[in-house]
Amino acid sequence: MILEDILFQPYTGEFKLIDPNGRSHSKYYDVAKTLLSLDTFYELFYFDEFQLDADKDMDNVSIDFHQPQTVEVYRDMSERFWAFLRGNAAKFFPGDPDWEKRLVLLNGLQNLAIVMFHLIKHQKEDRAIGFLLMGIRKLSQALDSQHP
């Protein structure tokens, strides 16, 4: 699930999950989907809380988020989530020494999978490019982890 799919009542600690997708059946996919929010800032792109800057040839592209403090909160949540996963890896991913690599790869692929959806359905070219760039970044990270 992505963070957008969680309704949280801060005063009581109660929460509800909305927009469930019960078709996955893959713990790797489900966890990578959460990382779509935490590691690649899905909601910040979805709600257009970013600025894409590029030269005319798209050789140099940068992404600046409108609220850097929100990015820091996401990064902190990401670190805590990864720590939680590492602390429970034997239970969640038994016998899989490559579970972290799989999650990074899936996160990259999930970013790439939503590029055309946001380009065609939402007609948001900058958002689509943002997801594309984040997907490439994560796939590069996954590739780099293959070479010690």
Image (tube, rainbow, N blue to C red):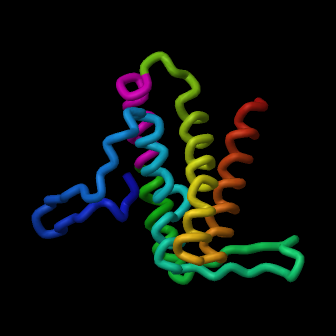
Locate residue 5 relative to residue 111 in the image: left or right: left
**Residue beneath the point at 43% across and 25% down:** 93
Q: Quadrant of residue 13?
A: bottom left
Q: Position of residue 66 (x, y in %)?
A: 55, 83
Depth check: 12 or 32 in front?
32
Nearer to me, 45 or 22: 22
Q: Is residue 63 above or below residue 3?
A: below
Residue drawn at 66 percent across, 50 percent down = 138
Look at the picture and state if 140 lies above or below 114: above
Residue 136: x %, y % from top left: 71, 54
The answer to whether residue 27 shows anywhere in this view is yes
The magenta span reads: 81-93
The C terminus sits in image quarter? top right
127 to the left or right of 27: right
Look at 18% across and 68% down and name the residue there: 10
Does the magenta segment cover residue 87?
Answer: yes
